């Protein structure tokens, strides 16, 4: 059975229309937080070593990247920059889980209580979310060492992991990974075509300098959550 991509998108739009605050507003808050985190990281880099903008400029001017990094992250200042950067990356991952998974699931379920607090949902179980992100990155990276396509397949195989963790807080990370692989059997191609159907939107985001992402991001994430429901229901009907 092939999913009706247009139906999933219509349902996503309908659910988004019911929300108050609107997903666009929640998306703006999420992206503003992301910008603030980036500015903090860059400011600390400028104070203790080298700003990321200056690093990018030097690399763009032809300075070997290993020389730039060696000068940017040397000494105590470099250690501070690395430590703060890691913390900011982890905070960003937890916020991404709140916005892209928990909030998207609640919107897709037409839960009118969905809102700004969902952005912090990842902080309720930070260890599980960070561990899941790390393990998924390792698996996808290792498969990518073979060729790009095995890495892409691995990413789609593990696509449902975070949804499962959001829906089942008691579920161990490795079990969520295993269940994701089972759920995605026979559905990886459909997930790929669903993502590809957003290509035009993503190109428009690039043309607008990313501004359009405040609409496209919640639209895509809600549609992806609808796809999770579709896959889960179909696999349940199969007796899996």
Image: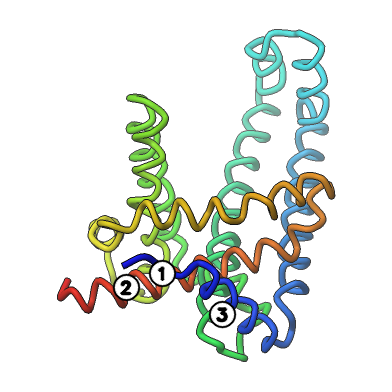
Residue sitting at 50 percent across and 58 percent down? 194
Question: Image check: 135 left or right of 26?
Answer: left
Q: Nearer the viewer, residue 133 or 87?
A: 133
**Element marked by disc 2:** helix
Residue sitting at 33 percent across and 58 percent down? 187
> In the rendering, at what x and y percent does residue 184 appear?
30, 58
Q: Which mark is residue 11?
A: 3
> In the rendering, at what x and y percent does residue 88 appear?
63, 48
- Callout 2–callout 1 Cβ contact below 8 Å: yes
Task: Determine the image quadrant of residue 78.
Answer: top right
**Element marked by disc 1:** helix
What residue does disc 1 label? 228
Q: CA distance from mark 1 to mark 3?
A: 13 Å
Question: Image check: 84 left or right of 93?
Answer: right
What residue does disc 2 label? 232
Disc 2 crowd, CA 10 A, few/some/many (<14, 14-19, 20+): some
């Amino acid at each position: 059975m092939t999913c009706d991509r247009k139906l999933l998108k219509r349902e996503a739009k309908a659910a988004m229309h019911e929300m108050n605050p609107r997903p666009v507003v929640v998306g703006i808050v999420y992206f503003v937080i992301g910008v603030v985190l980036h500015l903090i990281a860059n400011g600390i880099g400028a104070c203790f070593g080298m700003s990321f903008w200056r690093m990018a400029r030097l690399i763009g001017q032809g300075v070997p990247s290993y020389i730039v990094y060696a000068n940017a992250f040397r000494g105590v200042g470099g250690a501070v920059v690395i430590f703060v950067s890691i913390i900011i990356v982890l905070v960003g991952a937890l916020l991404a889980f709140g916005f892209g998974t928990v909030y998207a699931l609640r919107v897709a379920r037409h839960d009118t209580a969905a809102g700004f607090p969902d952005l912090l949902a990842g902080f309720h179980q930070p260890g599980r979310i960070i561990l899941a992100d790390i393990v998924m990155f390792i698996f996808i990276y290792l498969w990518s060492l073979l060729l790009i396509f095995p890495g892409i397949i691995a990413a789609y195989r593990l696509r449902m992991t975070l949804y499962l963790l959001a829906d089942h807080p008691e579920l161990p990370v490795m079990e969520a990974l295993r269940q994701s692989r089972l759920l995605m059997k026979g559905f990886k191609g459909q997930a790929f075509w669903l993502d590809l159907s957003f290509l035009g939107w993503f190109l428009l985001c690039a043309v607008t300098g990313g501004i359009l992402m405040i609409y496209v991001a919640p639209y895509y994430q809600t549609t992806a959550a609808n796809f999770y429901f579709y896959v889960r229901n179909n696999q349940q009907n199969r007796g899996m």
